[in-house]
Amino acid sequence: MVTEKVKVNMRNGIHLRLAGEIVKAANMFKAVVMISKDSMKVNGKSILGVAGLGAEFGAELMIEIDGEDEREAMQYLVDMFDSNFSEKER
Amino acid sequence: MDRARADRSELIFHGIPASPGIAIGEAFVVNVENLAITEDRIDEDHVESEIKLFESALSETEAELDTLHRTLEDEMGEEHAKILDSHRLILADQQMKSDTIGLIRDERFNAAFAFSQVLDKVLTAFMNIKDGYLRERAEDIRDVKRRVTRHLLGQKVEGLANLRKKAIVVAKNLTPSDTAGLKKKYVLAFVSDIGGSTSHAAILARSQSIPAVVGLDGFSTRTRSYDMIIVDGNTGQVILNPTPETVVSYREARVRFLELERELLILKDYPAVTLDGRTIELSGNIENEDEVDDVISHGAKGIGLFRTEYFFITRDTLPSEEEQYRFYSKIVRRIAPDPVIIRTLDVGGDKIAQWVVNNKEANPFMGWRGIRFTLARKDIFRAQLRAIFRAAAHGRVRIMFPMISVMEEVLAARAICEEVKEDLKQERYQIGEDVEIGIMIETPSAVAIADRLAHEVDFFSIGTNDLIQYALAVDRGNSRISYLYDALHPSILRLINDTVRAAHKGNIWVGICGEMPARVRAALVVIGLGIDELSASPVHIPEIKKIIRSITYDEAKLLVKKALQKSTLAQVRELLDQYIREKRPELQELVREVP
C-alpha cells in the first residue's frame, strides 16, 4: 500500500466536476483508492464520495492506494493535483 | 379543463420580488409531479425484479441526459453541455449502485426508497460542508435524484427544454440543470414556490433582466400550464386568471415601467437632495452579497437594512462566527466608505429556520421572534455580534435590533454588546470602534416609549411593514381584511410622526425601511415627516430619488401637517393626490396603484 499527502490548490475546491475527474482517473487502475480528509475516508472511485469530502481550497487530503498498480495510480493522481488539474482551475 | 378554467376567478398571490419588470402571459408549469416515495418493503420474490427496475431507471436517466446533452450542445455550445458530465458520473457511481442494491436485497426496500436513502446520506454529508460554493453543488445531486426517482415511479416530465413558445415559467424550484435546457427567448418571467432573492432562478432572472417572483408558497400546484398569469417583479405580486380589466391595466403599467426605468436610471449619479437643499440618506435593503451591486448600480449610498436571517435560514446548520465574519466583512468592504446597518437575526414570524426547533406557534407574528429569540439564545446572539464587531473593522457598520417592544430588551442587548466588545479586545481581535447601535421601531409599544428609547440608542429605523400590521391589527395575508393594510392611515402617520419627534428631541437620527417609502404618496409623507434616512429595495431607489429631487422639504412639511389633521384614509389620499395633481404633476406617472 502507498500513501501520499496532497493539497487542494484549486480556488473553488474539489467541486463535483473535479471530483468527476479524480474518479475517472482512479477508475483507470485496478488498485483500491481511498481518499481521506480529517476523519472522513471515502472511496476514490465514487464521485459522490469524493465530492462529499467538501475539500475546499487549501485542504489537505491523504490518498491511500492498495493493489498491483498502486504506484502508477499514485503517480497519476499526484500529478493531477500538482498541475492543478492542468487547466482552467486556478 | 376549459370548464374548470372558466370556474376559476382572479387570484392574487404575494411573493418575494426577485427581479423587476412586469410580464403577462401563459404559464408553463415545470415538474410539478409530486414524487411520492413510500417506505413499502418488497417480497423476497421481487428482489431481483426490483434491482432490474433500478438498473433500467439508471439507464433511462442516462438516455434522457444524452438527449439533453445534445440539445444543449446545439443551442448553447459544448461548454454548457459539460454541466451534465457530473450528472452522468453520479449515475455511473459504483458505490452508489452497490449501496442501493444492498438495501434492496438486505432490507427489502423498494428501489425508489433504497435509492433515496443512499442519496440522502450523501446529501447530508454535503450539508455539513463548510464551504458554501461546494455545498451548493448538492443541487446537482438532488437533480439526479429527482430524475432517477421519476423513472422509478414512472412519471413523465414536462421539462423546460420542451418550451416552444413564449411563456411564464412556473416551478416549485428551478435547479441549474432545469434552466440549462432553457431557451431564453421563450421565457417571459420566472415564478417559483421556494427560494429567496438569492436562489438560482432569482439570480438568473436578474442577470437576464427577466421579471421574477419567488417564495410563492404552493403556487405551482395551483397553476396549470396555459393558465393566464401576470407577474409583477416590482411588487412581488402574481395574479392567476386575471380579469380582462386587470390585464389592460398591467399592460399599461408594463409600458410605463419600461419607459420609466430608462428615465430613472439617469438619476443614478445625482444626490438625494430636495429642491430646497435637504439631503436625505438614501440607502438600499439587502440580504446577500450580490445585491450590494444592485444597491450601487441603482444609485443608493450605503445599506440601510441588511437582513442577516437569510444567511441563517437558507441552510441546515447554524453558521459559525467565522463564516458570519467572512460574509459580513465582504459586504462591509464592498460598500465602504458608505455605511451598512446590519440587523441582528430576525427569525420567527414568517421566517423560521430549520435549525430552530420545531417551533409551531399559534400566532408567530406575536411570538418568539426578533430580539426575543436572540436574547433567549445568547449563544447565537453573541456569535453574531462578535462577527459583526469584527467585520466593523473593515468599514462603517451600524447594528440594529429588531422587534423591540420594551426598554428591558434594549438594555439587555446593549449590555451583551459591551461584553462582546470587551471579550474581543481581550482576545486581541481588531474591532470597529465607533459602531452605532440602533433599534427598529416596529411595535406600537416602542413608539409609545420612543422618547425614553432615544436616550439609550444612536438611531431608530422605523420598520413600516410590521408597524402597520401591529398598529392596525391586520394580517395582510388575510384577504378579507387586507384592505385595512395601508401606510397612509392617519393612525400610522401619527405613529411615525411621534417617533420622528422623539428621535430628534433626543438628538438621534431616524430612518425608515420597509415597502412604504416605495410608494409615491407615502414617500412624500415620509420626507415631510422629517425622516433622515430612507432605505428600500434597490429597484425602488431611482424612483424614490426622483421624488426627493422633485419636491421641497418645506412644502412636504406643510403637506404632512395637514395630513396629520385628517381623520380618514380617503381624506389623506385625496389631500396627497390633489397636491401631486396641482403642484407636482411630473410625479403623477409614478403613482402606480397595486390592484
Image (cartoon, rainbow, N blue to C red):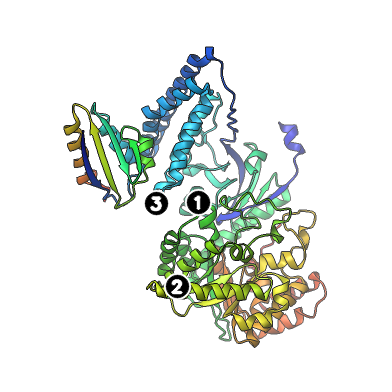
For residue B317, the mark is: 1
Q: Is residue B209 above or below residue B180?
A: below
Closer-to-camera residue (A24/B355) = B355
What's under tag 3, amino acid-wise?
Asp
| Kind of element beneath mark 1 | loop
Q: Residues within 10 Å of mark 1 (few under 14, many from 20)?
A: some
What residue is rendered at 55% in x and 46% in y?
B188
What's under tag 2, amino acid-wise?
Asp
Q: Quadrant of the N terminus of chain B?
A: top right
Answer left or right for B64 relative to B20. left
Residue identified by numbered label 2: B423
Front position among marks 3 and 1: 1
What residue is rendered at 23% in x and 46% in y?
A6
Q: Residues within 10 Å of mark 3 (few under 14, many from 20)?
A: some
Are the residues at dot 3 and dot 1 in contact (C-beta closer than 8 Å)? no
| Kind of element beneath mark 3 | loop
| Kind of element beneath mark 2 | helix
Q: Is residue B399 above or below residue B279?
A: above
Image coords of residue B461 (percent x, y): 61, 74
Q: CA distance from mark 3 to mark 2?
A: 27 Å
For residue B131, the mark is: 3
Q: Quadrant of the C terminus of chain B?
A: bottom right
Answer left or right for B435 relative to B374. left
Q: CA distance from mark 3 to mark 1?
A: 13 Å
Q: To which quarter of the image does residue B501 belong? A: bottom right
Front position among marks 3 and 2: 2
What chain letter is assigned to the residue under label 2? B
Q: To which quarter of the image does residue B405 belong? A: bottom right
Image coords of residue B324 (percent x, y): 45, 61
Image coords of residue B341 (percent x, y): 52, 71
Sequence-wise, which precedes: disc 3 or disc 2?
A: 3
